[in-house]
Image: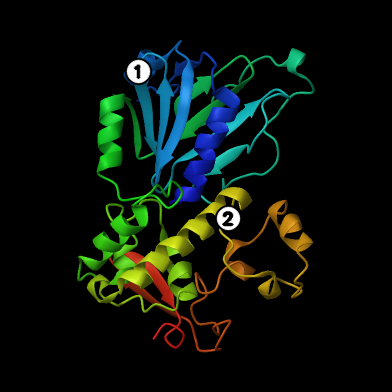
Amino acid sequence: MPEGHSVRRLARQFGDVFGGRRLAVSSPQGRFAAGAALLDGYTLVAADAHGKHLFLHFDHGLVLHVHLGLYGAWSFGGDRTFAGASSIGAPRRVGERETPAAADDGGASYAGPPPPVGAVRVRLASSHGWADLRGATTCAAITAVEAAAVSARLGPDPLRNVRGDAARFAARLRGRRTPLAALLMDQAVIAGVGNVYRAEVLFRRRLDPWLPGSAVEDAAARRLWRELAVLMNDGVADGRIITTPARYWSGGSADPQQRIALKSAEYPEAADAHYVYKREGLPCRVCRTTVLLAELAGRKLYWCPSCQA
């Protein structure tokens, strides 16, 4: 499932390429035909994200609410003025592409979006480009009040990080006896964190994933929040989750230019980019103890039993 940094990048891309433009909204698949009719012909005025939820606000007061879930993905295309990632979301075989979305030699030659491929739930199209949504868990036309209610049910988002969020997160975390690793995946405790960020931030903070939330000191909970804010903002900038320093990457170079090259390459996320995620059975990068794998609340949990004791 795409984590919070990917949804934040989606919101930015929609704002960049569709902000202030009147959109044709359709449902080639047909499942969202009624909702598309409510949005068709109106102007996108804002794009926002809260955790894993995307909200596209139109000028007549309605909002397109999308949660990608496990299999949802957006694909994009357009003329030379329509720049951005060509796809963002799941599944991994689609992935996020850092190449420009432009498909034509020049804006004047752009002839509109191509015929839909596959089960396109909703298509947004302007005079310069298009975006297709497939496989989302949630795709709904709702009111601004309903959108605010969705956000109110969620925990604080490290990518918003407004005043008081660290304290709210610490209180929600410390008010439960549930294992820390499960709490980080609870979107009512903290919004936007998924399996990769969960595993990596617990390792970086050397926290036992099985520790009850109630046993975490307030200062430690706030440090955890700050670490997540840094890591997730890096994810927004990089377009992928990289939690290890350059010395762990292939070749062992600490050259800062390697990070720039990394961002423009097709990079195998689990190979060098992570400390423990998908590294079960391999030696810990820090202490050489074997990284373990267990299932917690239906999701895979990775951790080092020595560093995180």
Q: CA distance from mark 2 to mark 1?
A: 33 Å
* Location of residue 300 (image quadrant): bottom left
Q: Position of residue 94 (x, y in %)?
A: 56, 45
41 horizontally vs 38: left or right: right
The quarter holding residue 182 reads bottom left
Task: Determine the residue positioned at 58% across, 55% down.
Answer: 234
Residue at 52 percent across and 75 percent down: it is: 279
Residue 88 figure quarter: top right
Residue beneath disc 2: 234
Q: Quick one: quadrant of the C terminus? A: bottom left
Residue sitting at 25 percent across and 67 percent down? 174
- Residue 74 in sight from this viewpoint: no
Up-down relation of residue 118 to residue 282 (above or below): above
The residue indicated by pointer 1 is 61
Crowd class of label 1 (few under 14; some 14 to 19; many from 20; radius 10 Å): few
Q: Amino acid at mark 2?
A: Asp
Q: Residue furthest top?
A: 41
Q: Secondary structure at mark 2?
A: helix
Q: Earlier in the sequence, mark 2 or mark 1?
A: 1
Nearest to the observer: residue 239 or residue 237: 237
The image position of residue 281, as x and y in percent, is 50, 82
**Residue 257 vertical position relative to residue 65 in the rendered view, above or below:** below
Q: Amino acid at mark 1?
A: Gly
- Residue at 63% of width from left, 39% of height from top? 85
Around disc 2, counting alpha carbons within 10 Å, would you say few (fewer than 14), some (14 to 19), or many (20 or more)? some
Image location (x, y in percent) of residue 297: 28, 65
Indicate left or right for 244 with 37 as reference.
right
Is residue 267 at least partly visible in the picture?
yes
SS of the residue at dot 1?
loop
Q: Vertical placement of 109 versus 240: above or below?
A: above
